[in-house]
Structure formats: structure tokens, C-alpha cells
């Protein structure tokens, strides 16, 4: 991501001063950007952001978008993770139904620990199709949560479900903004849509005994 794009991205996550720093106009670029472990980032926040991270499989959104969500929540914004499937076919040793349930449990707990919410659409892992049903289901949730930023897969991903997710989100954003399409929630325009790449599969891991309810599998 070049400096201009990074500046826009940070501004969309409410990091107004940090974005100004990236632009290099009066401050040197901050090598710690994206690592809110020190300093007073709260003082740098502008307006609270509302971020929706949409992925094909539960783990995708946390590995590729979790940092942005965590930062948004820390700065007073709100975030929701939406997974189009439970990723049930991601294990060679655990049956899909069981593994999907574990992924759901892990994703719910991880979202809770980050201060975010988690939503799921139960399309079959490996067989997500960019049809109208999925697009309408996604756009209903976009209207419900009214994000000003959506993070999702890039169209050039290696995984077919990721590509389908890209297509679903692209059209869902379009549908969500059409007032003539009357559904449960009012039309909502999403100002910013960002795409991420570079996810990898891992085994879900949930800290035991956390305050968010879920324990280890
Ligand atoms: Zn994936």
C-alpha cells in the first residue's frame, strides 16, 4: 500500500493524526503505525469509524483484517466480522460439521475479545457461489450494521471462495445503497471498500477461560 492509500485507509479508521504523519508533511513517518501498544492513540482519533470485515471463512477476517478492527474498536469505533461460511472443510482430521462449529466458536470468542461482533452465513465451505441469494443476505447485514468501511478479499485471491466473496460484497454494497430496494433496513451507502490479500490457514485457537465465553476445543 503506498503512502496515499495508507493515509486514506488510516483516516477511514479514524486515525486522523496518524494519517497526517504518514503523509510526511510535518512529521516523519511513524514506524509503529498499526501497533497501538504505546503512545496515546485515543488522542489522535478523529471521528469514530464503523468497520465491517467480510470474509469467506472465519479465520480470514482475523488474520488479514483483525488489526484494523482492533484499532477501530480501541479508538471508540465499532466493528463486525461477517463470515460467509463456517470453514468446515478446513481440517483433514476433524469432520466438517464439528470443525465448522469449532471455527464458529473460535471466531465468536476472538471477535468478543477484540470488542467486535460476529455474524455468519452458513454457505458450504469450498462451494460459496456469488449468487443473488448470498448478495442479498450480505446486503441485509450491511444495511443493518451501516459500516463506513468494508474490508474484504481481493478478486485475485488464489481461493475460489475468496473470489466469490469479492463478487458478493461488491454487489451487496451496490444493492445496499439503492433506496428503491426496500427490505427490512433502510438503504445505506458504504463510502469505502478495501481489499486484502495474503491469508493462510491455521488451526483455530481460543484462549481457555476468557471472559467471552468460549473455551478450547
Ligand atoms: Zn479463506
Image (cartoon, rainbow, N blue to C red):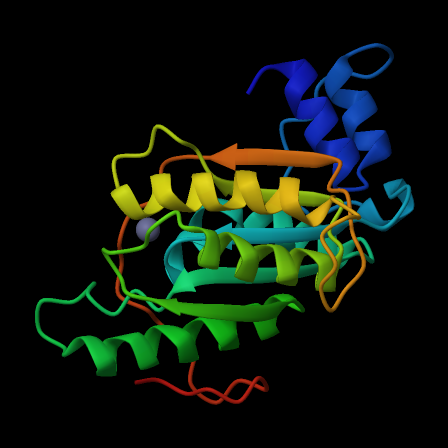
Q: Answer above or below: position of 71 versus 174.
A: below
Q: Is 152 situated left or right of 36 in this image? A: left
Q: Answer above or below: position of 29 versus 140.
A: above
Q: Which of 68 and 168 is in front in this view?
A: 168
Residue at the (77%, 43%) spot, across then down: 189
Residue 94, image x, y percentages: 14, 77
Q: Answer above or below: position of 198 versus 141.
A: above
Residue 206 makes an appearance in the image: no
Q: Is 86 situated left or right of 76 in this image? A: left
Q: Nearer the viewer, residue 120 or 130?
A: 130
Q: Which of 167 and 102 is in front in this view?
A: 167
Residue 161, image x, y percentages: 31, 48
Residue 57 makes an appearance in the image: yes
Residue 41, image x, y percentages: 81, 45
Counting the numbered discs, the total is 0
Give the position of the C terminus as an image quadrant: bottom left
Q: Quadrant of residue 206?
A: bottom left
Residue at the (79%, 22%) spot, across then down: 21
Give the residue furthest to the top. Answer: 25
Residue at the (81%, 41%) spot, across then down: 14
Q: Is 91 situated left or right of 142 in this image? A: left
Residue at the (40%, 31%) spot, across then down: 155
Residue 174, image x, y percentages: 64, 40
Q: Nearer the viewer, residue 6 or 127?
A: 127
Amino acid at each position: 500500500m503506498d503512502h496515499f492509500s495508507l493515509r486514506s485507509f488510516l483516516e477511514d479508521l479514524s486515525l486522523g493524526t496518524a494519517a497526517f504523519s504518514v503523509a510526511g508533511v510535518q512529521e516523519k513517518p511513524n514506524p509503529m503505525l498499526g501497533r497501538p501498544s504505546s503512545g496515546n492513540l485515543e488522542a489522535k482519533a478523529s471521528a469514530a469509524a464503523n468497520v465491517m470485515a467480510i470474509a469467506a471463512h472465519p479465520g480470514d477476517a482475523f488474520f488479514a483484517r483483525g488489526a484494523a478492527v482492533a484499532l477501530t474498536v480501541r479508538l471508540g469505533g465499532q466493528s463486525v466480522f461477517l463470515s460467509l461460511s463456517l470453514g468446515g472443510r478446513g481440517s483433514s482430521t476433524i469432520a466438517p460439521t464439528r470443525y465448522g462449529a469449532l471455527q464458529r466458536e473460535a471466531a465468536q470468542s476472538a471477535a468478543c475479545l477484540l470488542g467486535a461482533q460476529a455474524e455468519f452465513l452458513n454457505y458450504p465451505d469450498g462451494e460459496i457461489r456469488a449468487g443473488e441469494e448470498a448478495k442479498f443476505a450480505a446486503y441485509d447485514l450491511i444495511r443493518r450494521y451501516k459500516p463506513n468501511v468494508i474490508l474484504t478479499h481481493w478478486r485475485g485471491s488464489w481461493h475460489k471462495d475468496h473470489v466469490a466473496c469479492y463478487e458478493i460484497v461488491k454487489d451487496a454494497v451496490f444493492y445496499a445503497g439503492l433506496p428503491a430496494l426496500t427490505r427490512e433496513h433502510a438503504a445505506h451507502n458504504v463510502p469505502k471498500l478495501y481489499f486484502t490479500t495474503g491469508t493462510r490457514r491455521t488451526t483455530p485457537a481460543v484462549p481457555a477461560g476468557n471472559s467471552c465465553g468460549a473455551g478450547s476445543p
